[in-house]
Image (cartoon, rainbow, N blue to C red):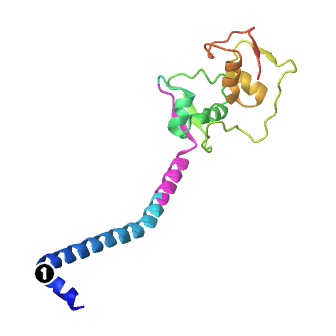
Amino acid sequence: MVKELKNLTNPDSLVSLFLGLAVVIVIGVLIVNYVKGRPQMKQQTAAQQEQQNATESAKLPATHTVAAGETLWSIAETTIGSGYNWVDIAKANNMTNPDHITAGEKLTIPSVTKREPGQVSSTSVEIKRPADGKHTVLKGESLWSVSLAVYGTGYRWPDIAKLNKLANPNLIYSGNVLVLP
């Protein structure tokens, strides 16, 4: 004990001791503040998220006026938060050709849940695949409409395009015979 007291009388030892204690105290305070602040930050973030969702859902259903260059996909991304909801907008507006919208047209934006990639519109999908596994394209059809008619979801169009080795999936002609996956 006496030896330790002699070491503390040295000015360098005292400075080192106080600096060491100060560092330990500062680190301790930072850790305590970090631990105390974490749950509060999570609650605040969750509360802000709930408020934002409530604000967005309060806005829907709404009316959207189509601007030049917009597509149903871009409108769905802007208003609902997912381009995959373009199907819901088309359905809400009873569109026969969703590829044809014009600037100035007023569309109803339905209050629906945000779709994720690959999500189908319903839980039960009836598959109406022809027995020969082929489909003859009719006038006005797209790969999306063929996929929708055959599989109950339009999201299988890339599979049809890939199997048929289509260089431009947007360009199919009536009379073309497509092999179905």
Residue 142's spot in the image, x, y percent?
68, 18
Residue reaching furthest to the right: 131
Q: Which residues are magenta?
A: 46-67
Residue 168 visible at all: yes
Give me the residue at 76% from left, 42% from top.
123
> Observer-nearest residue: 87 or 62?
87
Q: Amino acid at mark 1?
A: Asn
> Observer-nearest residue: 44 or 165?
165
Locate the C terminus by quadrant. top right
Give me the residue at 25% from left, 76% from top.
21
Residue 2's spot in the image, x, y percent?
21, 91
Q: Is residue 20 above or below residue 151?
A: below
Disc 1: which residue: 10
Horizontal side of 59 relative to 22 (left or right) equals right
Main SS of residues in magenta? helix
Q: Secondary structure at mark 1?
A: loop
Horizontal side of 176 relative to 87 (left or right) equals right
Q: Is residue 61 above or below residue 168?
A: below
User: Does 64 lie within the magenta span?
Assistant: yes
Residue 10's spot in the image, x, y percent?
13, 81
Give me the residue at 71% from left, 19% from top.
163
Give me the residue at 47% from left, 26% from top.
67
